[in-house]
Amino acid sequence: MSLRTQIIHGLRSLVRRATSDRDLSDEVEHYLAEAAAAYRQQGLSDADARRAAQLDLGSRTAVQQQVRASRWETVVETLLVDLRRAARRLRRTPGFAVVTVITLALGIGASTAIFSIIRPVLLEPLPYPDGDRVVVVTDIAQNATPLDVTFGTYREIVARNRTLQRASVSRTWLPTFSGGGEAERLDGQSVSADYFRVLGVAPALGRDFLPSDDVPGAAPVAILSDGLWRRRFAADPGAIGRTVTLDGAAVTIVGVMPRTFEHVWRPETRIWRPLGYNPSLPLQGREWAHHLQMFARLVPDAALDVARRDLSTIARMPVPEFTRPAWASIRGGLAVTPLQEYVAAPAKPALGAVMAATLLLLLVAAVNVVTLMLARGAERRRELAVCASFGASRLRLLTPLLAEAVLLVAVGGTLGVALAYSLVGEMVTLDGVAVPRLEAIRVDRAALAFAAGLSAAIGLIAAAIPGLTLSKRIDSLASGARVMGSGHRLQRAFVAAEVALALVLLIGAGLLLQTVQRLLAVPMGFHAERVLTLQVQVGGIDFRDPQTVHRFFDRVRAAVAAVPGVTRAAVTSQLPLSGDSDLYGVQSRAEFVDRPQSAREALRYAVSPSYLETMGIPLLSGRPIEDRDGAAAPRVAVLSAALARRHFPDRTPLGQQMRIGNTDVWYTVVGVAGNVRQSSPALSPLEAIYISDAQSPSADRAMWLVVHATDPAALEPAIRRAIQTVDSNRPILKVATMEQRVAASAARQRFAMAAFQAFAAIALVLAVIGVYGVLAGEVVERTREIALRSAVGASRTRIMALILRQAAGVGLAGILAGAAVASVTSRGLAALLFEVSPLDAITYAGLAAVLLLATSAGALLPAWRAARIQPATALQA
Amino acid sequence: MSDSNTDVIQGTLDMLILKALSLEPLHGFGIGRRLEQMSGHVFKVNPGSLLTALNRLERSGWLASEWADTPNARRAKFYRLTRTGRRQLDTETAEWTRRAGAIARILAEEA
């Protein structure tokens, strides 16, 4: 009540200041009149009465001031006046204001953007009830890398574990949705019955999968995402129980997931169906293939460590009830990773690096503001000393400085938030960085609070440090002393810090630049030029027969090859740098005879004739897959050089027999081709086996078309049309030139590098400005001393050298500190670097030299000015 | 006017103003004069303090004010007690009585 009246009255008098002031002066005037009248009644003359009343009251203005001072809005008024004055002062030095505001905006904007991205990815729990209890279970392969589990392993874990409340497996399923409009390829998952219960989310409509859905031969059912349901069924609740055609088969919709449900590791998933694997685990079946992702929910009180020990015991100690075929052995162990970590892992190194760069930029911005405020404080020393000697309070003296800091930070922070909005929009559309949970990333209230807190902290620091040193100096000035140097020493320290931060950023940028260059210089094993790639998928009952699939892709290939401008066209089951990694256990006939379980992994490519030629993969010996290697011809294979060396180190592989997987199908080796980097330039198995797609016992239903043409990008529409003349119902996906795929293979490093380069450039410019600022100030202050020096015979060169030495001192101190910091922080980049050490001496030395030159350049103008000081005029002044 | 008039006791001005206004609305000078009369010319109120206090009490919602003509035809700002002001006067009076009684008892003991 009282607070409300306070505020209302205060605001009223703020808004209508004139009325409120007149009110007060009228009241004082009336008081005076009444007092005079009272004296007159006591018999005083008119003039005496008025004088006596006046004496009682004292100064009218003083009384009014006294009343006004008791009001809170007066403080606000003073503040507004201070801010207005600060704005006027800043307008007089627009350079200072603009530079500071821009740095602050960049620092705060970039930090807020990164915060917005990192919060849902790394900090917030996943959007599931007790999401921290959801884990991913993987096999550990011989080379210690994670490997998808087999259905058999999953069954064994479910039966034997003591720490998992529920577990499920899933596998990508890409059905074609037809009937009721245009055919559409959907992203889906085949999942075991407990899948959604592991996540702790139930369908919003209809029912969840039941164990009876998840057996071979069960009636086909599916659950839709909210988005798909809205799009294809116009959010009709009657969709439950309806039948849709998926891959040509009738499937009943049994449920719709809630709108808020996020499928975090594959956000594009729109539909789920039961896996339906055979629980009797036939040895030759898919039940023993490493192609399932396993998710589990820990029991409420089980720590991650306990679960890890539990599962590793299961892996280490086989029991007779659960026999494992050799290729599905889990002797390597089982890895248990929190889902959040699993989801964030691919994006973590790049995000971490960008976050580090951003923090450095923020520090640069803060240091820069402090340095500039220090310089301004130094300029205004005399003025402030005069005010101090008239008795202004210390707080009152520092308010102008505070007001400037508040103003700069407020403007910088506001611009920063605006920048954050556009940066976040930009970053989430970046390819190849693999940021999960894109829908959850936005500049929200928490991010705004973060930006506000950051701005306030910087403002406080920017005002406090110069304020404290200044108030110390005002004391000594007020006492008449002349202090020299001490302020500059602090200023110099801050400039050195700017130099150090610039070096840390420069080194990060340098290391990443070399990484990107080296990644792109790695021989990929194929010629990326003029090759367009795209995926065509088939499915459904029309394509049950492998030969139908093969004939379809043969016709597609022929149609595309006939497009004018196309020089060659081929198909392959997996494409380098496409994200595919189709690994099989392979062995030679001799190995099979010795030890039947000795198969080792290699990449399997089912290709059409002329694939190697189209991709420019060199043939080292023998012959490639040719037209004669049709379905009826003897089965043949081409090995990569690495695979040939692994299996036939001391003899020619030509004429030898190999098998792929645990089958009785043998291929005769007819050629050896060059090694190809399948997954990335940095890390990739090189062992590969190529077979003719016509001879593969099982059909690959998603095939890549690789087209060599004079201008592949321009031919894309024509190529699409050619494919559609064969069958217009087949989705065409993932279109990109091979050159684009190569460029994208270094996307994470490019992303981090872009941040480091931009921020390093800013830091460098600021460091140079900082050096200039502090030296320019010093030259002005030391005018007399320098004049004296030149009067007693110091040459201009010597005086210039004097100033340049100062700059070199600041620069060197900064460089040493920066190198020391970088040698620690750059290790954080190690996960992104390729063939370059985080301590690369050449990078460090080169960039230090650049920085030293830059800081000296900043000192040139002050040095030149110092050299031009005329002793006669300077000393007379 | 007595020579021995003094400033009001620290912290009691608000209460005294509320008391002075408890009978009828008054303007600033009127309040000062009323306090002098009521104290038997012991207290003399400083005009600056008085106007500041009036401003503060109005802000607190204990007084309301309006401009009106005085009997001698001057425009003056008249203050009157609000309902919360009257309640405040009661609390302050009770509190003061309690304290004054305590002080009186101490002094009586000493004597």
Image (cartoon, helix red, strand yellow):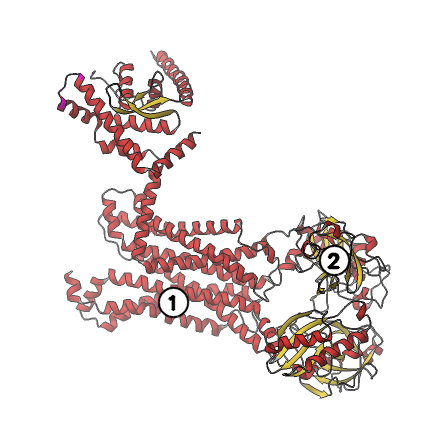
Relative image position of residue A289 (x, y in whole percent): 78, 66
Mark 2: give few (<14), some (14-19) or many (20+) Cα within 10 Å. Answer: many
What residue sits right under mark 1 in the picture? A812
Residue displayed at 13% across by 24% down: A47
Ranked by sequence position, the earlier of labels 1 and 2 is 2
Q: Looking at the picture, tell me which residue is in the foreground, A218 or A758.
A: A218
Q: Is residue A680 visible?
A: no
Give residue A723's position: percent from left, percent from top: 70, 75
Element under disc 1: helix
**Is A478 positioned to the left or the right of A772 in the image?**
left
What's drawn in magenta, residue-wise? A41-46
Alpha-carbon distance for marks 1 and 2? 62 Å
Residue A717: name its quadrant: bottom right
Q: In the rendered view, does A167 fall on the left or right side of A707?
A: right
**Residue position for label 2:** A272
From what the image shows, is residue A613 above or below residue A157? below
Which of these two is toward me, A178 or A374? A178
Which quarter shows the N terminus of chain A?
Answer: top left
Is A525 a magenta residue? no
Disc number placed over residue A179 in the picture, else none:
none
Quadrant the C terminus of chain A occupies:
bottom left
